Amino acid sequence: MAYLYSMQALIDYLNQFGSVSKANMDFLVRHIEEKTLKKGDHLIDLGQPVNSMYCIEEGYVHCFALNEEGEKLTRRIEGPISCWTVLESFYDLEPSPVECIALSPVKYFELSRKGYDAIKAENEELNGLISRITERLLSEKLIATMKYSSMTAEERYLDMVENQPDVVKIVPVQALASFLGISRETLHRIRRKLVTS
Amino acid sequence: MAYLYSMQALIDYLNQFGSVSKANMDFLVRHIEEKTLKKGDHLIDLGQPVNSMYCIEEGYVHCFALNEEGEKLTRRIEGPISCWTVLESFYDLEPSPVECIALSPVKYFELSRKGYDAIKAENEELNGLISRITERLLSEKLIATMKYSSMTAEERYLDMVENQPDVVKIVPVQALASFLGISRETLHRIRRKLVTS
DNA sequence: GAAAAACTGTGTCAAATGACACACTAACAC
DNA sequence: GTGTTAGTGTGTCATTTGACACAGTTTTTC
């Protein structure tokens, strides 16, 4: 069984977390769907339960909540290549507190909860792989989030320019400012200062 | 085999995450040590690798990094009853970026990395229990951290008054302010405003 | 391609914050 | 106890930030 080129990229990504037999990888991959979004398409709707995990292959999605005034509060910006979901909805079966919309054309992989459960139940090797992936992704995300929360907005912006330059280029200034926890005017001041210095 | 009363509390806590056989729980408990700290004692030293997980039974510990000026930047305040460790050090075997000191007399449980590995390797039921605990604690902490990072300092303070009143009472104002990401003067202004309103 | 909508750049101003200063109190060591 | 150190309450002031306003630009829609 040969894979599409793109599926092979996903397999390489998953193998980082510990290799598994070809048969097990085939079993896993059979539960994953490859899908696309056009710019502006909704990946996750507000208030709907999130029953899948995602892995973006190309493009970016913008996840945000809405405050009382209807302004978008950016919660996350996801791009290639990492696995993620809306934790509080996926784990606790609650309605999603956020809406996720494609900022550009997007290619992504989707693993439904049913597939996720089937893989974990299939055998020990797959269950171990899924556990390792979950633990690693959760701990990395937690470390990154805690690190970010102890930085100023300017430091966080510089970190993004350094480590995620594509995100800074593609994401609207308003969404980026909201992600950094500051107003768009303040982000503008930071950028102006950096340009002139 | 009967347990000390305090050990029984830990077992009850662990059983929340899915029950296991008596034999397995005995095996697990044999790897856990109960220890104490006096006020001011160091639980974790700056720059040392963290090779244990902890579960505070009584009292509070203050975990902080130091900035260039030598000021304490509070990273976490841990009290009863939850399991935790310094993730970035425990998982990646790196020197601890934080120092942890008892704010009061403390009783706690300690599970060394050796014990942790032995429990995971012992059998399927114990491995599954540890995985479930790890995933749940990581995801809850991540959800809480992300929720906190989208709140103002005042909202975070009110949340603590509501949900962790003991922490607010016991922890020095400076440490609390640092934990909330504001100066002690600003925390004082918030408190003054709340008292008079 | 014209109109509408969304987004961006920038100035002004009021509010919030941090830095500093200093008096006061509590905790600790001897 | 007494002196020393760490921590707290509070006022002043300069800086930073967010809110608002509005003109210019880009993107979308029909």
Image (cartoon, coloured by chain):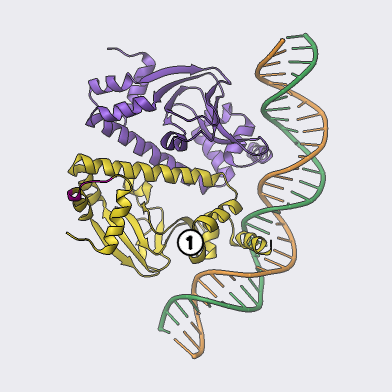
Chain colours: A yellow, B purple, C orange, D green
Judge left or right: residue B113 versus residue A74: left
Position of residue A170 in the picture relative to residue C13 (left or right)? left
Q: In this view, does B41 lie to the left or right of A140?
A: right
The chain carrying label 1 is A
The quarter of the picture where residue A140 lies is top left
**Is residue B13 rendered to the left or right of residue B125?**
right
Q: Main secondary structure of the magenta part?
A: loop
SS type, badge 1? helix
Give yes or no for residue B82 being in the magenta stretch: no
Residue under the image location 58 percent in, 44 percent down: B153
Q: Which residue is drawn at 53% across and 18% down?
A: B105
Q: Quadrant location of the C terminus of chain A?
A: bottom right
State the image coordinates of residue A136 (x, y, percent, origin top left).
37, 43
* Residue A20 covered by magenta stretch: yes
Residue B190, image x, y percentages: 64, 40
Q: Which residues make up the magenta segment? A: A19-23
Q: Residue at x 48, y 66 (%)?
A: A170
Query: Crowdedness of circle 1 by 10 Å Cα count: few (<14), some, many (20+)?
Result: some
Give the residue number, with chain letter if any, for mark 1. A167
